Image (cartoon, rainbow, N blue to C red):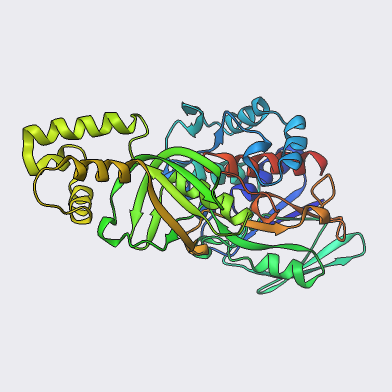
Amino acid sequence: MTFLIVGASASGLYTSIFLKRKHSDAKVIVFERNAKPGRKLNATGNGHCNLLNLLFDGSYFNNPEFVNLLLEEFPLETMLRAIESFGVPLLNKGDLVYPLSYSAKTYAETLFTLAKKLGVEFNFGIEVSDFKPKGNQIEVSFSNGKLITDKLILATGGRSQSKLGSDGKIIDLLNRKGIDIIPLTPSLCPLKTEEKTKALSGVRHGAKISLFSSGQCLYEEMGEVLFKDDGLSGIAIFNASSFIARNPGQYEIQIDFFPEMELGQLESKMKEAKEVLGEGYLEAILEEKFAAEIRAKFRKNGTKDKEIADICGYLKKASFHVKGLYGFEDSQVSHGGVSLEEINPDLSLSKFPNVHLVGEIIDIDGRCGGFNLGWCLLSSLKVAKVL
């Protein structure tokens, strides 16, 4: 029995380990277009590798019912035990689960080391260009030859961060073969805004963000907001981008930079600071760059309370109109992929039953916080079980 996996991604590495453990005498072969395994995995979680979330369930994904069906079969405890079976102790930071090393690089190296120890064969710098049924098997074409395999597993991801390996070429190949593809769009990415933000570029501030469309609040989250040259970033913004990717339209983001206090409380604190510090009072409340921009925005003479009221009103309800999403290179995941209508319950393609899919190549994407890596693990557990 031969299993050929395309992509040494997180889902590809997971699947190779599970299959080799289950079928010790089988050949498990991984083809990867990059020179090294797990390049995108190396960058996840700001380099710390947020593996999973203790709140993991379908409600954090675009297709919740599909995720929950697999989760019934492989509950959270099973997923945690699967990671620990790699010899990786876990570290919890609130609901977020990390490797104890707190390092994405060492986690990726651990998976690679374990897969090789089990006997998985890796081939780097090789790009798969086609596949076709050949009797009860699959003939796979790649850059320097062909190979016959019993089962083909596609673990190539979507189109986000092509420099790390997810260029979407396999999804394009599937589309040419008549597989229905939900159009790919960037997700978990910064947002471009109509309002100019360059003067605040690099400023970070805790906040509550509220996403509005046609006057209705559709999404809210507490988190850090990061200003960029032409828009907004940060985890809360990333999650808002996920909502927008799934529901295209016109959006406004309102930001409360001091959600822990009411407007009147903020005004009182500013007045107290101004009484003591005079015109330098804003630096006692805001980071220097932020204070300078607010001062310029609301520049007035004297120490009138109206100035403080205007500033506080803005800081409690700053408005930004979304111009668009950042591109694929700045997104953590892609929204879209192979339509669930094309996929059997065992995650094989209905048109090609010997071809299975794992990870982001499927039209499943989740919020920040370990959900997408969790999906890679969950889908890999399913495919390894049925093969």
Q: Is residue 163 above or below residue 86?
A: below
* Front in this rendered view, residue 320 or 100: 320
* Front in this rendered view, residue 183 or 73: 183
* Front in this rendered view, residue 309 or 10: 309
Q: Position of residue 292 (x, y in %)?
A: 17, 52
Whether residue 43 sits left or right of residue 280 in the image: it is right
Residue positioned most to the right: 135
Which quadrant holds residue 61? Answer: top right
Identity of the residue drawn at 33% across and 62% down: 196
Q: Where is residue 12 in the image (x, y as percent from the top left)?
A: 64, 50
Identity of the residue drawn at 20% across and 30% down: 269
Q: In this view, does 64 lie above or below 170?
A: above
Which quadrant holds residue 274? Answer: top left
How many dots with numbers? 0
- Screen quadrant of the C terminus: top right
Whether residue 344 sits left or right of residue 379 in the image: it is right
Identity of the residue drawn at 59% across and 56% down: 245
Whether residue 20 sits left or right of residue 166 in the image: it is right
Whether residue 197 sits left or right of residue 385 in the image: it is left
Q: Position of residue 345 (x, y in %)?
A: 84, 44
In this rendering, does residue 20 appear at all? no
Q: Where is residue 181 in the image (x, y as percent from the top left)?
A: 74, 63
In this rendering, does residue 357 appear at all? yes
